[in-house]
Image (tube, rainbow, N blue to C red):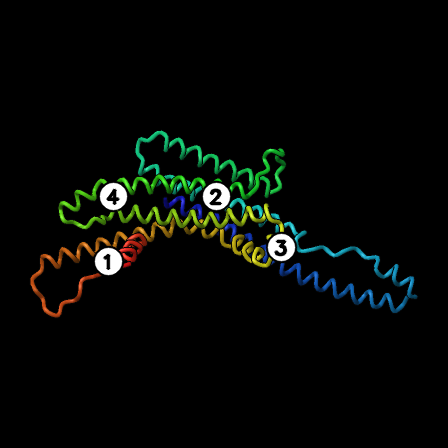
Amino acid sequence: MLVAIVIMWMSTVSDWIATLVAVVEDYTALQDLTLRSLRRMTDMQDCIGTLPGSDATWSCFQQAPLTTLLDSPVHSIQNCTNTAALTVNVVIGDAIVWWRAWVLWPGDSLVRCMCVVMILATMVLGAMDTATTCGAQVPGWVLINPSRVALFSLLTNAVATTLIAYRAWKHRRLIMSYLKARGSSPRTQVERTLALLVESGVLFCAFWVIIVVYEFSEVKYPAFEVSAFAHGLYYVIRGCLVPLIGMYPTVVIIVCAVNKSLYEKSARSSSEIGNASIVFNGAPPTRRRGTLSELLGAGASTE
């Protein structure tokens, strides 16, 4: 897991460096373009003042067009780096989600076959998209629409999250009667961790739904692409997609660790209170913070 997180952060840093270099190149090119435009305007004024009207119209405007900012090769490198980093993060992120399903379904050949097939398909689609963006000479059938890559990643995460949710539901049904018979809390640490994995998977799928809807809106409705909202969403997705996917497994690990430490602290406090003698003016017991599913369940019961 540590190696996967390090690789994702390295790809994110490389994308950030390429973007920073492209911004600096754009700033320098914009300054140069502004100076050349001003110099050309001055030359045209001098030319018009020294020649007759008809000759000035023909001679003074016969100049080579100025290059645009998008002609710089830095933009091609930045696009290639962004697509490659996105491919690496998506493949590793999907592999982490499927690794959870793999662990929760030990010995199930169907789940393992689905895991291998979907991860390999994600790698192949990402490699094709990266090769196309980086300008490699590829056959026509290799050209991949980015919306299809996003849709397949959404499908991969949805299937893996569904398998994890089903296993969490089966686990809850299995231990519910046993814990109730003992008078213990039906919310165990394992169940809290499974609930957190399901909730994070659902949020990640919702994130991919937004990406898929945006990608297909560009293809299906060309008028949407020229709207101000589409331009703003494009820059947000282009700048934040790679880092957000890279942060996802790290955030899940941190939240799981915090949830585990809070649970252990709460259990330790409860045992100390049960074994201790009566102490007046003692500090109140530490209150454990619940997960998202616990908060939703408490809100539904109060209603």
Q: Decide if residue 276 is on the left or right side of residue 237.
A: left
Mark toward the start of the polypeptide (4 vs 3): 4
Q: Nearer the viewer, residue 87 or 117?
A: 117
Mark toward the start of the polypeptide (1 vs 3): 3
Q: Amino acid at mark 4?
A: Arg
Q: Amino acid at mark 3?
A: Val
Which residue is under mark 1?
288
The spot of residue 81 in percent (x, y) is: 55, 47
| Residue 88, numbered label | 2
CB atoms at circles 1 and 2 under 8 Å apart?
A: no
Quadrant that contains the N terminus: top left
At 52% across and 41% down in the image, what residue appears?
A: 149
Which residue is under mark 4?
172
The secondary structure type at the circle numbered 4 is helix
CB atoms at circles 2 and 3 under 8 Å apart?
A: no
CB atoms at circles 4 and 3 under 8 Å apart?
A: no
